[in-house]
């Protein structure tokens, strides 16, 4: 052929073991490409390689064989004719005997055997020859791990591809495999081995075939690995997990019923071992194998399985015994672990398999009958000793699981246990008399043994769950003629009566929580049984409802009972929904819903109002029609009490109205929002508010109730916020009509947009400054609608409304400012062509706000120069902020308003926010003349020289908090604000440099102080990641901010937030440099904060921040050690435990920097 | 000193679960026995790699506190009557509490009545300021105490 020399070179290079693995790999690739490109045929290659394949040098022979094998591995898709295939496989089959060159032979066989049929495959007889040679020559366990792996793969491949040929080898094969697998320890090889055994079993399905005699050996071999236990550390052998291996072993065990005599005893033995892993695995394996082994074979073991199961369940429950807590509220409060879960699975499986046998075993079980016999000796739950409780719980769980298995079991267990329970409860006798009326003097309390009640409830709930499950899956529907059904029907009436009367008598007596829990549960189950299986007459159903209602109304001091009863009622209400029976539904409506609603307006009942509302809401959630009814009722009460306050001036209703409104805000509106299709309710509520506003304003009564108005506003906001645009349009139209009909507000503003102000000496007094109460009410409610409006909602007469809000926020109504901010945030841009011409676009609105001069200054006392400019000097919003008018209050209002407008702009990312920021910054600089215009100088020479008042500067600083923080009241997602992502970052990175440079430039200590405050407020709301990246510049100013904020108790939350930012910098890698530079100041600041009296979290966090400080370089912090230790020793005496504990930790950290133990 | 261990084979008890306290955001938390117990339960026994809790030398009930007067009384039970380590244990307790409480707390440490052969002298030794101070000056003792307090063996 063409390139023999090149080929020889490659072969030589591959065979030579002194070459590096990469070189060998390249030469292999070269040979492969030669063959692939048809430059040489495989036959030529083999002939060429003759010396390498036949040499007596073991190493070279092995490499040579391997080269051919690897080549074939890479040429799976190359077609080969039969002759070639035959000679190649024959070659490799022979080579299997050559243990020194085995690797190549194995790889070669695998490569050939795995070929797809269309490219030429190994014939059946050749495959059989391979298998024979394999069995004859290879001692698998004497080989290395990789070779073993190849051996197993080869075996697997043979069994899968040539089952008939391999099977014809008979016992030889089985013996060979047993030998090969015996003693294997490598996880991957084991996984393969398990697969081989599983496949092997499929080869010999005949129970009397050759496999039969080997079953014992095989299962013994397999049994050695059970339960799979890894001694490898977790990191190693990540490719084979314990679960994979365990599953493979399980499949191997379950592969044939022939294993049963050997495996089941093994599992049962391991089940009794104390190792939890062994228990879980045994249970799992048994559950899996049982269906595969078949009912007949498993029947032999039924007794043993039952006993082991019972032991496993009871011991695993014993281990995790815990006391019943009222919070858990599910069962007896014994924790269940994996063992119990698996055990119940197995119980269910074997019960399905051998129903009769198992159920008779369970019914005759001595432990269970002992439990039944002991039942009568204890009354209440608390009388039963711990062991008894556990035993009871075990029996209860077993009964529940077994009864729930299928209808046959259900019948059997009901028949055998239910009458006994009824006997114990002394209920059966009463049935014969046929008395279906309530027998009040049936004093059950002392006969109502807890054990019986508990088991009875478990049985009932199992039965009910079984029915419900079968209805969902629509399989074997359960008829009313079933035995358990009849039995239940016979007893139900008296049982219900018994439960009712115990719950009623239970009111007076203090019963144990657990007792009550099961009584309520029992009654609830009986009440929610499907109608067709357990028909309960209307009067009985009503009796149940009345029983629960009486608990709700009277027993509210018994919190657990009250909650349970409420939950039961909600359950019953929900259940009526699913199987609708008009009679029951209407009685639920009448007895529960209407009854509880009727209680709302009257405060006479002893049930506290908050509980009343809770109960009402919970019951409402059971069904939409109930909720609608309840909302209607509550709405009536709200407006009745609101009118009571506003029209009749009855202040006693204030509290109730607030609670009702809060119930709407916090519970009902979110619920409606969740259901999503009850918008008309929201609309009705909002419209109703405006309907009533008219009547409120018409009355003469003046009521100043800030809390009530706030609650009304919040409820209105939330209602409007959840509405769609159409509904919002309706609401706004309605509100606007009320607003415009109120002449005192809008007319005045629109005709004269200016109010005379006398700048000098004229301080608008509070009385004239505010609107009348009625106007205020309308204004604020209107503002809350505007705040909650969606961006697309149409607002009529925008300009007029803007003027109104501008005028009102200057009077100190923050909500007006918020509404203005919301409008600015949501108004459309001018370019939007769909806007109606009368509408006001964003630019115009901004123009109106900033350029309207609402304040005309008529000032006679100033020199005549001014009068030249017509009749006065107009002052815009920005001028107001910087203090043209010497009216402090006005200035503060203007700044707060500006801040909210600025927030609206900031959120949507509008340019104008820069101007707002500049105005605010100007206010912060006390040197008023810097930004003053000539006009101002000419106007008020005296005042402009004056420094701004501290309170004005403080509000300017706080404006930055308004800008940066998230507000609950407006401009958030709930109220449809337009929010650009990352707006906080953007604002932070534009404002901080300005603030920093101003701090440097500032020469007045007070304005610097205010700048610190403003910076701190910006920092604390900025995302931590941005702050940390700027840590070097920020830290000094942040520390100043800490001391500024720690001065006033009002700022304690802000102080805490800022401290958290510092701790973020402290713990971040990027912050380290900044920390080192400022270590001294940081420690000073933190030691000051350790004694901050107003907030525990501040003290705790300050101490926590000191701990990482102790890790700084020794020379840097050693001088401060004494100072820190002294400060911490004071914290050791802190009134709060958390602080003390942190102090101890911190003290250890600091004490240990000098020596191992703290000396003083 | 005797050769070998004084109590070669102590009874080891299980550690009790730590109770997570419910956070009460309002009001002050008074110092209570559990808080002190949490500080001292993990002190290692001078002889064995077990904590005082595991050897049942201490329990929550053996600690009494009067927060108002600032008094703490700890009664501990040495594992055997002739335990010469009783004083070391007492010293450990004293050193640890000194770190963990401000100086105005008065700490009394005693062996429980009848649990030690030289009960009186041990009690006297443990509550004598100067003897405690002197003991802590002794480098060997100091090292032993530090090992018990800061041991990582548990």
Image (cartoon, grey):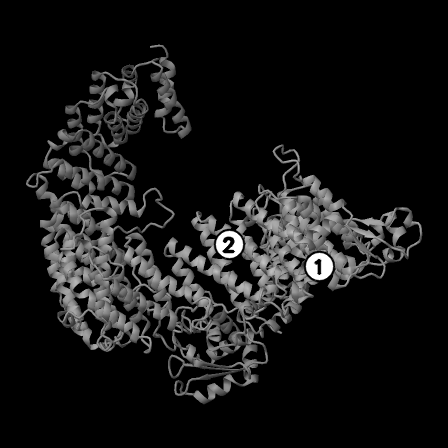
Q: Residues within 10 Å of mark 2 (few under 14, many from 20)?
A: many
Q: Residues within 10 Å of mark 1 (few under 14, many from 20)?
A: some
Q: Which residue is mark 2?
A: A685
**How many numbered circles are shown?**
2
Estimate the x, y position of residue A19 in percent, counting from the top left: 40, 28
Q: Nearer the viewer, residue A112 or A723?
A: A723
Quarter of the figure with the N terminus of chain A: top left
Determine whether A255 is above or below A1157 in the image: above
Residue at the farthest left position: A208
Question: Could you tell me if residue A906 is visible in this image?
Answer: no
Estimate the x, y position of residue A614 in percent, counting from the top left: 43, 64
Residue at the farthest right position: A864
Quarter of the figure with the C terminus of chain A: bottom right
Tag 1 secondary structure: helix
> In the image, are marks 2 and 1 on the same chain?
yes
- In the displayed structure image, the side of residue A343 where residue A1143 appears, left or right: right
Q: Quadrant of residue A460?
A: bottom left
Q: Nearer the viewer, residue A324 or A300?
A: A324
Tag 2 secondary structure: helix
Say the numbered circle drawn on residue A1065.
none
- In the displayed structure image, the side of residue A887 where residue A35 appears, left or right: left
Residue at 67%, 46% (x, y): give it.
A987
Residue at 10%, 56% (x, y): give it.
A356
Estimate the x, y position of residue A531 in percent, counting from the top left: 23, 56
Determine whether A980 is above or below A458 in the image: above
Estimate the x, y position of residue A998 in percent, counting from the top left: 77, 51
Q: Which residue is mark 1?
A: A1040
Determine whether B120 is above or below A1095 in the image: below
Q: Earlier in the sequence, mark 2 or mark 1?
A: 2
């Amino acid at each position: 052929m063409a390139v023999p020399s090149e080929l020889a070179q490659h072969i030589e290079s591959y065979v030579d073991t002194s070459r590096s693995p990469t070189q060998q790999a390249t030469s292999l690739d070269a040979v492969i490409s030669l063959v692939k490109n048809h430059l040489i045929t495989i036959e030529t290659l083999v002939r060429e390689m003759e010396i390498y394949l036949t040499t007596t040098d073991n190493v070279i022979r092995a490499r040579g064989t391997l080269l051919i094998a690897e080549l074939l591995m890479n040429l799976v898709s190359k077609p080969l004719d039969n002759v070639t295939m035959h000679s190649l496989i024959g070659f490799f089959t022979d080579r299997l005997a050559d243990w020194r060159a085995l690797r190549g032979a194995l790889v070669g066989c695998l490569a050939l055997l795995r070929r797809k049929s269309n490219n030429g495959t190994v014939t059946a007889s050749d495959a059989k020859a391979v298998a024979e040679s394999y069995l004859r020559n290879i001692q698998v366990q004497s080989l290395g791990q990789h070779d073993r792996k190849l051996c197993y793969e080869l075996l697997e491949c043979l069994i899968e591809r040539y089952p008939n040929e391999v099977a014809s080898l008979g016992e030889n094969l089985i013996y060979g495999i047993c030998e090969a697998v015996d003693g294997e320890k490598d996880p991957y090889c084991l996984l393969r081995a398990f697969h081989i055994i599983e496949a092997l079993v499929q080869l010999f399905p005949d129970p009397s075939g050759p496999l039969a005699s080997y079953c014992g050996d095989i299962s013994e071999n397999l049994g050695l690995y059970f339960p799979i236990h890894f001694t490898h550390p977790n990191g190693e052998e990540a490719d084979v997990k314990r679960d994979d291996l365990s599953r493979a072993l399980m499949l191997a065990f379950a592969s044939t019923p022939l294993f049963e005599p050997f495996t089941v005893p093994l599992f049962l033995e391991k089940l009794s071992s104390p190792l939890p892993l062994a228990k879980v695995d045994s249970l799992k394996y048994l559950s899996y194998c049982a269906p595969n082994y078949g009912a007949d074979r498993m029947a032999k073991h039924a007794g043993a399985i039952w006993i082991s199961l019972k032991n496993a369940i009871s011991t695993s429950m014993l281990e995790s015994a815990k006391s019943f807590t009222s919070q858990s509220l599910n069962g007896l409060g014994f924790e269940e672990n994996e063992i119990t879960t698996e055990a119940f699975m197995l119980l269910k499986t074997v019960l399905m398999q051998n129903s009769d046998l198992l159920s008779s075993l369970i019914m005759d079980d001595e432990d269970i009958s002992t439990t039944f016999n002991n039942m009568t000796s204890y009354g209440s739950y608390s009388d039963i000793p711990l062991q008894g409780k556990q035993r009871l719980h075990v029996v209860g769980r077993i009964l529940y699981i077994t009864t729930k298995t299928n209808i046959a079991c259900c019948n059997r267990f009901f028949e055998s246990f239910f009458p006994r329970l009824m006997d114990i409860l002394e209920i059966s006798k009463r049935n014969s008399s046929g008395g279906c009326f309530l027998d009040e003097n049936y004093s059950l309390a002392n006969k109502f043994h807890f054990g019986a009640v508990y088991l009875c409830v478990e049985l009932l709930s199992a039965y009910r769950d079984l029915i419900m499950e079968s209805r969902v899956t629509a399989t074997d529907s359960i008829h009313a003629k079933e035995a358990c059904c009849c039995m239940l029907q016979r007893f139900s009436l008296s049982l219900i009566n018994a439960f009712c009367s115990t719950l009623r008598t239970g009111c007076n007596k203090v019963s144990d929580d657990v007792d009550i829990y099961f009584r309520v549960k029992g009654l609830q189950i009986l009440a929610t049984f499907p109608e067709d299986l357990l028909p309960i007459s209307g009067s009985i159903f009503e009796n149940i409802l009345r029983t629960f209602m009486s608990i709700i109304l009277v027993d509210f001091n018994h919190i657990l009972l009250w909650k349970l009863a409420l939950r039961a009622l909600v359950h019953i209400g929900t259940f009526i929904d699913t199987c609708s029976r008009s009679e029951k539904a209407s009685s639920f409506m009448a007895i529960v819903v209407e009854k509880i609603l009727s209680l709302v307006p009257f405060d006479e009942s002893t049930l506290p109002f908050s509980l009343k509302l809770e109960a009402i809401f919970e019951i409402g959630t059971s069904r939409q029609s109930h909720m609608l009814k309840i909302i209607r009722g509550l709405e009536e009460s709200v407006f009745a009490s609101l009118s009571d306050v506003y029209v009749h001036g009855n202040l006693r209703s204030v509290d109730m109205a607030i609670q009702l409104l809060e119930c709407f805000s916090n519970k009902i509106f979110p619920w409606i929002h969740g259901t999503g299709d009850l918008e008309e309710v929201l609309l009705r509520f909002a419209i109703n508010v405006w309907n009533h506003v008219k009547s409120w304003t018409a009355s003469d009564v003046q009521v100043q109730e800030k809390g009530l108005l706030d609650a009304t506003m919040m409820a209105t906001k939330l209602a409007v916020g959840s509405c769609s645009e159409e509904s919002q349009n309706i609401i706004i139209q309605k509100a606007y009509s009320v607003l415009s009909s109120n002449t005192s507000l809008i007319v005045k503003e629109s005709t004269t947009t200016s109010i005379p102000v006398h700048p000098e000496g004229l301080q608008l007094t509070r009385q004239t400054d505010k609107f009348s109460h009625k106007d205020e009410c309308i204004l604020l409610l209107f503002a809350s609608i505007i705040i909650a409006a969606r961006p697309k909602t149409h607002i009529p007469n925008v300009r007029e409304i803007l003027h109104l809000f501008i005028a009102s926020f200057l009077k100190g109504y923050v909500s007006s400012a918020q509404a203005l901010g919301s409008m600015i945030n949501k108004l459309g841009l001018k370019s939007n062509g769909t806007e109606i011409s009368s509408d006001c676009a964003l630019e115009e609105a901004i123009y109106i706000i900033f350029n309207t001069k609402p304040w005309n200054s008529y000032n006679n006392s100033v020199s005549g120069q001014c009068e030249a400019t017509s009749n006065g000097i107009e002052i815009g919003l920005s001028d107001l902020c910087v203090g043209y008018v010497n009216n402090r209050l006005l200035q503060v209002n203007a700044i707060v308003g500006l801040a909210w407008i600025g927030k609206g702009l900031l959120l949507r990312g509008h340019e104008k926010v820069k101007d707002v920021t500049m105005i605010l910054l100007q206010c912060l600089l006390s040197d008023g003349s810097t930004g003053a215009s000539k006009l101002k100088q000419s106007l008020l020479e005296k005042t402009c020289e004056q420094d701004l008042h501290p309170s004005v500067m403080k509000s300017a600083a706080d404006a930055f908090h308004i800008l940066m923080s998230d507000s609950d009241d407006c401009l958030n997602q709930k109220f449809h604000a337009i929010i650009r992502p990352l707006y906080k970052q953007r604002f932070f990175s534009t404002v901080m440099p300005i603030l920093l440079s101003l701090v440097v430039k500032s020469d007045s200590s007070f304005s610097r102080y205010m700048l610190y405050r403003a910076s701190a407020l910006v920092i604390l709301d900025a995302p931590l990641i941005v702050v940390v990246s700027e840590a070097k510049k920020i830290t000094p100013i942040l520390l100043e901010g800490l001391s500024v904020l720690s001065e006033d108790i009002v700022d304690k939350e802000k102080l805490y937030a800022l401290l958290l930012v510092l701790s973020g910098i402290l713990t971040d890698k990027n912050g380290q440099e900044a920390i080192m530079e400022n270590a001294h100041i940081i420690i000073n600041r933190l030691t000051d904060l350790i004694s901050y009296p107003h907030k525990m979290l501040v003290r705790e966090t300050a101490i926590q921040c000191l701990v990482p400080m102790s890790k700084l370089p020794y020379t840097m912090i050693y001088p401060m050690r004494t100072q820190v230790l002294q400060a911490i020793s004071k914290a050791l005496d802190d009134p709060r435990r958390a602080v003390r504990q942190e102090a101890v930790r911190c003290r250890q950290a600091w004490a240990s920097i000098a020596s191992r133990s703290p000396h003083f | 000193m005797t050769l070998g261990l004084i109590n070669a084979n102590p009874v080891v008890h299980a550690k009790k679960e730590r109770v997570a306290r419910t956070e009460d955001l309002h009001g002050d938390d008074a110092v209570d026995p559990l808080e002190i117990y949490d500080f001292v339960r993990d002190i290692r026994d001078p002889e064995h790699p077990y904590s005082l809790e595991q050897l049942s030398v201490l329990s929550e009930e053996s600690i009494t506190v009067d927060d108002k007067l600032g008094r703490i009384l700890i009664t501990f039970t040495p594992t055997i009557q002739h335990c010469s380590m009783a004083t070391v244990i007492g010293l450990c307790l004293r050193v640890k509490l000194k770190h963990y409480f401000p100086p105005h707390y008065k700490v009394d440490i005693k062996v429980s009545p009848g649990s030690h052969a030289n009960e009186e002298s041990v009690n006297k030794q443990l509550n004598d300021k100067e003897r405690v101070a002197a003991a802590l000056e002794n480098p060997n003792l100091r090292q032993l105490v530090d090992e018990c307090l800061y041991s990582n063996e548990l």
